[in-house]
Amino acid sequence: MKKEQVNELLYEALETERGGINVYRTAIKCAQNDELKEEWEKYLEETENHERILLEVFEKLGLDPVKETPGRQVVRHIGQSLIKAMEMALEAGKPEQAELVAAECVVHAETKDHMNWELIGEVARASKGDEKKALEEAYEEVEDQEDEHLYHTMGWTRELHLQGLGLPAVIPPPEEEKEVKTMIGAGRAKAARTKMKKTTKKT
Ligand SMILES: [Fe+2]
């Protein structure tokens, strides 16, 4: 394995969690649906915990959590852009649009977060000794939550868009009820929505 690139992955992962905390704080301000708001509040807490878990990994591996890397700066830039996008939407004064923008921003942020942890899982499998133990423990603790953050928010984003278009929507999305935690599960939940009770929001 390429040690330098493994370290880069971990720096980017830490920056992603930190950016994610700010993304959720802003997204919560944009949430209109109470269940979605509650969900994001839970994800915010979990993301704060992921940051703590990563800091423990940094300590165990002897990595400096404040070290800057070019990749990390890119992750920070993207995180700040997502926040700016939500602020723009909030300023436009259309709450339902801002909620949609926020849902998309959470999906963007969680896509990177989810990929980081998948890769950390792969690195853990290929590692040995203390490094393997530290990465495996962190991965086990975080993995399921990352799946939920991404797949459930993707479901919310789709249904909120459908609702906004005046089309029948399933809210909360089927991903919630089916507790989707895999890509295959997300596909099944999406397919199952055809049989579920939908509502069309009157404007
Ligand atoms: Fe996370």
Image (tube, rainbow, N blue to C red):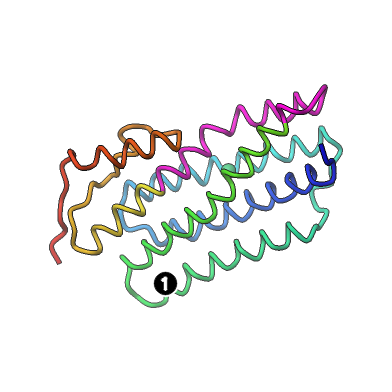
Closer-to-camera residue (73/31): 73
Residue 82 vertical placement versus 56 (above, below): below
**Mark 1 Cα within 10 Å, few/some/many (few <14, many 20+)?**
many
Q: Is residue 28 above or below residue 139?
A: below
Residue 13 locus on image (x, y percent):
68, 47
| The residue stretch that appears in magenta | 124-153
Residue placed under numbered mark 1 in the picture:
89
Q: Residue at (38%, 67%) from the top-left corner?
A: 98
Q: Report x, y in % for residue 186.
A: 38, 39
Quarter the C terminus occupies: bottom left
Residue 164 lies, in percent from the top left, at 25, 63
- Say which residue appears at 57% left-offset and 68% top-offset: 81
Query: Which secondary structure type mostly characterizes the magenta part of the structure?
Result: helix
Image position of 49 (left or right of 106): right
**Disc 1: residue Cβ within 8 A of ligand 1's nearest atom:** no
Quadrant in which the N terminus appears:
top right
- Residue type at numbered disc 1: Ala
**Residue at the farthest left position:** 202
Compared with 89, 192 (above or below) is: above
- Where ligand 1 lies, by quadrant? top right
SS of the residue under disc 1: helix
